[in-house]
């Protein structure tokens, strides 16, 4: 599990390369510092006849399917091996993810293992319920606001929730917990499977029933377990940590 960012071990302000201080939550990573961005510029074929969007989507899929045990694309807060040129930024990176808020969330998702909360159904009448799930209690651990993906312009996927990884591949390494079957544990079909990540989804059924959809995923983003839960995301995190049988996972 990656180191956790919290108020205990992270300053309220950070200093950029020019020596200017600004609040931590305003941190926008320089182009090329995120692992997926390094992967894209390193593997980009400038002679491909495919449209940039097609090549980018193919590379993102390869990034998701990579061997996650490698350290090749895991960086500290120092600059990565190679910074992109202005041409690479304009062709490869900026057209794909130009939103500063999304890149800021992606940055924090690479630094922390948290439960990603994705909203895929958008009806203004449901905003009150969404606010209840998110804002009336602490969101996840350490108030991890960056793990809440609630933007109709980007995430209005309906039932096709997997599309989130085309925009936020960092979410595929979300709340990670490797499980190993132990003799003292009760029989469970998931106990001897490596769980790569969990994700909570507020889909149309969730707003109708009040039950959020909790998915348990393998390292290829395949569903290996799911359950509807009458809990807020912060409470779901605690249930996962405790391996509460109420989840049935």
Image (cartoon, rainbow, N blue to C red):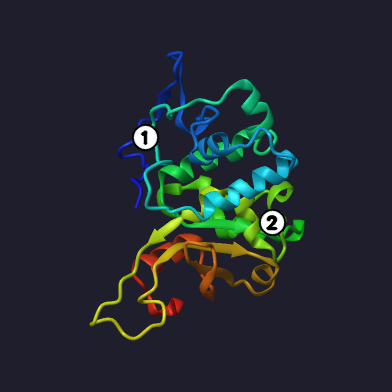
Q: Secondary structure at mark 2?
A: helix
Check disc 2: other Cα within 10 Å, few if <14, some if 14-19, many if 20+: few
Determine whether, in the image, residue 102 is placed left or right of residue 29.
right
Q: Decide if residue 34 is in sight here.
A: yes
Q: Quadrant of residue 121?
A: bottom right
Indicate whether 152 appears above or below 224.
Answer: above
The image position of residue 51, as x and y in percent, is 75, 41
The first of marks 1 and 2 along the sequence is 1
Which element is circle 1 on?
A: loop
Q: Return the x and y of residue 4 as percentages of the image width and height.
A: 35, 46
The quadrant of the image that shows the C terminus is bottom left
246 in relation to 14, above or below: below
Of 91 and 238, the residue lying toward us: 91
Separation of residues labelled 1 and 2 (CA atoms): 37 Å
Q: Which residue is mark 2?
A: 127
The image's mark for residue 76 is 1
């Amino acid at each position: 599990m990656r180191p956790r960012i919290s108020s205990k071990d992270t300053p309220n302000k950070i200093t950029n390369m020019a020596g200017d201080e600004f609040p931590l939550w305003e941190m926008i990573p320089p182009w090329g510092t995120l692992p997926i961005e390094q992967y894209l510029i390193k593997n980009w074929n400038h002679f491909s006849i495919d449209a940039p969007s097609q090549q980018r989507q193919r590379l993102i899929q390869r990034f998701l399917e990579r061997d996650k045990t490698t350290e090749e694309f895991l960086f500290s807060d120092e600059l990565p091996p190679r910074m992109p040129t202005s041409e690479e930024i304009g062709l490869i990176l900026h057209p794909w993810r130009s939103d500063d808020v999304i890149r800021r969330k992606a940055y924090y998702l690479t630094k922390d293992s948290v439960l990603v909360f994705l909203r895929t159904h958008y009806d203004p009448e449901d905003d009150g319920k969404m606010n209840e799930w998110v804002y009336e209690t602490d969101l996840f651990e350490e108030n991890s606001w960056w793990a809440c993906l609630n933007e109709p312009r980007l995430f209005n996927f309906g039932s096709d929730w997997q599309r989130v990884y085309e925009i936020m591949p960092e979410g595929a390494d979300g709340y990670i917990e490797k499980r190993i079957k132990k003799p003292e544990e009760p029989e469970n079909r998931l106990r001897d499977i490596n769980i790569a990540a969990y994700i909570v989804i507020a889909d149309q059924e969730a707003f109708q029933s009040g039950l959020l959809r909790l998915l348990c995923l393998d390292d290829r983003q395949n569903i290996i377990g799911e359950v509807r839960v009458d809990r807020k995301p912060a409470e779901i995190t605690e249930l996962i940590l405790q391996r509460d049988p109420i989840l049935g996972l």
